[in-house]
Image (cartoon, rainbow, N blue to C red):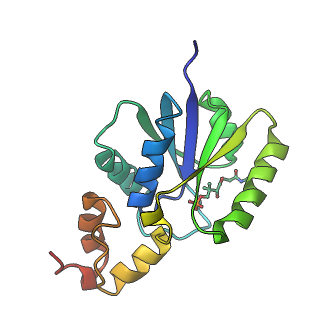
Amino acid sequence: MSEKIAVYPGSFDPITNGHVNLIERALQVFDKLIVAVAHNPNKTALFSVEERIEMIRVALKNDPRVSTASFQGLLVEFAVQQGANVIVRGLRALSDFEYEFQMTLMNRKLNRKVDTMFLMTGYKWFYTSSKIIKEAASLGGSVRGLVPEIVHQRLKDKFPAYRNLP
Ligand code: PNS
């Protein structure tokens, strides 16, 4: 039987424990998961694509079932290049739905052979996002427990107010 491969795309700026939880869930369904970091020149990111990929690798402890990549341009084209016909996305609170449905329908219009599968994050991560984590950290608020340890450490390099946290 052929391997079931999915792409899990996102900005991952930075990866959170919610993302890690979703990756663990996706690995119960797929043999291989490609965590794909979007390189979007129109969006200002805190971490470079290389920094984001490094944090993902460390957070996932180099799990052989997971590979990392960056992509630019259309996600469905990237998925096809990678031999994946499923895109995995996480759903948290209701506020995610509209944006996710728009993206899914657009991706489906662009390529009907690539489907999107939604997985829910664990309830503990329902209200965490990379954006809110960056905001708290920039003001010196500890986000330990919400992000992998490597991210907690890397945030110290980005935000002076975060530097002195244990
Ligand atoms: O983590 P994010 O920022 O919600 O991820 C959004 C992402 C990267 C999945 C989305 O912006 C995307 O798919 N970008 C690639 C461009 C694309 O394919 N656009 C057409 C479909 S909407």
The quarter of the displayed image where residue 151 is located: bottom left
Seen at 46% across and 36% down, the residue is: 27
- For the residue pair 141 and 94, the one nearer the viewer reads as 94
- For the residue pair 132 and 68, the one nearer the viewer reads as 132
Q: Relative to residue 15, is residue 113 drawn left or right?
A: right
| Horizontal and vertical percent position of residue 126 | 50, 67
Q: Relative to residue 151, is residue 19 drawn left or right?
A: right
- For the residue pair 46 and 122, the one nearer the viewer reads as 122
Q: Is residue 15 visible?
A: no
Seen at 25% across and 60% down, the residue is: 149
Q: Quadrant of ligand 1?
A: bottom right
Q: Relative to residue 114, is residue 136 drawn left or right?
A: left
Q: Quadrant of the N terminus?
A: top right
3 up-or-down from 43: above or below: above
Q: Residue furthest top?
A: 1
- For the residue pair 15 and 21, the one nearer the viewer reads as 21
Q: Relative to residue 52, is residue 31 drawn left or right?
A: right
Q: Quadrant of the C terminus?
A: bottom left
Q: Is residue 58 visible?
A: yes
64 up-or-down from 75: above or below: above
Seen at 57% across and 26% down, the residue is: 4
